[in-house]
Image (cartoon, helix red, strand yellow):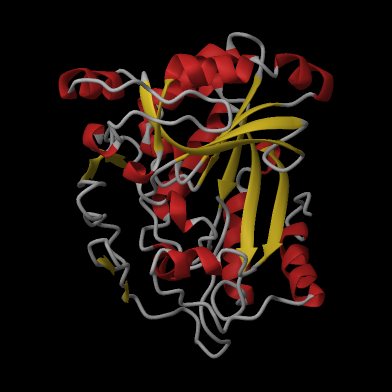
């Protein structure tokens, strides 16, 4: 889920408050600094204010966005059976059905130990550097049942125990499907399996405080410390992510922070310092900060999807630039990689 970038190195800081990105096949996203979440195509519907305490955005039900066709399975996982529209909507609302892009078993990438990572389909952000644009639309995923997802996790319980690993739910943006991940986290956590969420935090209000009891670790993307740059990078507002981080910190939930260094976009020292200041507020619950150099490994996916990739001319930062960014975080007493 971590990515980011923009052309050239010549912009001033802070940047302009308005930027528009066109995404073929989707409605145009007008990225203003107001934090208003526009409608994304026919699938993502509108956003409404959250519970009144966080100021975050909570998505309206997306029952029709989860595909209804019979799935063919994903590397040994069965697809959900074909349902009537009534049963389909009920299953999504109850968190018994979700849209899955893919899954994999990896070590020391999406959390500690060996992880089974589910990549759910659908994301409300439109990051310029997204390296998995094929996960953006929920309807492009595969329908899976909660029971099958739980069984898939339990197959690797011995591996998790031997490696201190567990389950990571990523995306896309996993909080686009909160009822499903709430049920999955509770079922898995109650069986003694370590749980993690990989998220940008924009939809953090989709999880109640009680839900956080079943989350051992959050991999939280801080894509920018400057609100205008964040808006330019993602098409969304920064504040909901900060508020979600505050809630996680208050609940004592451990965090791994990820910041992607993009030349000409997120690499201004003032932007990095602002991001580091945000993270420093949570120092006692932040286990590590990862400063990741921008790459263009996902560029071919954008082309395959007939989506314009705006960062073709953006270089990868060199080692000295990455280390300088890491030192800004280290100066605040954070453990940085």
Left or right, 221 with reference to 109? left
Residue situated in front as seen by the camera: 298 or 214: 298
Q: Residue furthest front?
A: 72
Q: Residue furthest top?
A: 191
Percent from the top left, x then y, of residue 238? 42, 56
Q: How many marks?
A: 0
Q: Residue at x 55, y 60 (%)?
A: 131
Residue situated in front as seen by the camera: 104 or 247: 104
Q: Residue at x 40, y 52 (%)?
A: 136
Percent from the top left, x then y, of residue 260? 62, 62
Percent from the top left, x then y, of residue 203? 38, 42
Q: Residue at x 56, y 14 (%)?
A: 151
Does residue 91 lie above or below 100 as drawn?
above
Left or right, 301 with reference to 323? left
Q: Residue at x 41, y 53 (%)?
A: 239
Residue situated in front as seen by the camera: 211 or 46: 46
Residue 56 showing in the rendered view: no
Quarter of the picture holding the C terminus: bottom right
Residue 52 showing in the rendered view: yes
Percent from the top left, x then y, of residue 26? 26, 61
Q: Residue furthest left?
A: 86
Does residue 268 lie above or below 289 as drawn?
below
Q: Quadrant of residue 275?
A: bottom right
Does residue 167 lie above or below 56 as drawn?
above
Q: Residue furthest bottom?
A: 10
């Amino acid at each position: 889920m971590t990515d980011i970038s923009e052309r050239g190195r010549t912009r001033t800081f802070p940047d302009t408050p308005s930027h528009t990105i066109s995404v073929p096949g989707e409605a145009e996203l007008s990225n203003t600094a107001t934090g208003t979440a526009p409608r994304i195509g026919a699938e993502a519907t509108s956003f409404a204010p959250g519970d009144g305490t966080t100021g975050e955005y909570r998505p309206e039900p997306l029952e029709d966005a989860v595909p209804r066709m019979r799935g063919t399975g994903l590397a040994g996982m069965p697809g959900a059976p074909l349902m009537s529209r009534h049963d389909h909507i009920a299953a999504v609302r109850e968190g018994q059905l979700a849209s899955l892009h893919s899954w994999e078993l990896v070590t020391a990438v999406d959390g500690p130990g060996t992880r089974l990572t589910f990549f759910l389909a659908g994301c409300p952000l439109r990051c310029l550097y997204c390296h998995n644009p094929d996960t953006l639309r929920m309807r492009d995923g595969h329908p899976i049942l909660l029971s099958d997802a739980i069984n898939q996790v339990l197959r690797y319980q011995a591996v998790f125990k031997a490696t201190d690993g567990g389950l990571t739910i990523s995306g896309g943006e996993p909080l686009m499907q909160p009822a499903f991940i709430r049920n999955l986290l509770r079922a898995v956590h109650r069986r003694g399996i370590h749980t993690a969420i990989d998220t940008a935090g924009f939809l953090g209000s989709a999880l109640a405080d009680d839900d956080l009891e079943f989350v051992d670790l959050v991999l939280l993307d801080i894509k920018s410390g400057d609100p205008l740059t964040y808006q330019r990078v993602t098409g969304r507002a920064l504040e909901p992510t900060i508020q979600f981080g505050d809630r996680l910190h208050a609940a004592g939930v451990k965090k791994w922070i990820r910041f992607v260094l993009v030349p000409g976009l997120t690499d201004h020292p003032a932007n990095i310092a602002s991001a580091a200041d945000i993270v420093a507020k949570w120092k006692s619950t932040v286990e590590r900060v990862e400063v990741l150099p921008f790459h263009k490994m996902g560029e071919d996916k954008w082309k395959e999807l007939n989506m314009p990739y705006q960062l073709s001319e953006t270089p990868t930062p060199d080692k000295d630039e990455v280390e300088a960014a890491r030192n800004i975080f280290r100066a605040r007493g954070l453990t940085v990689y």
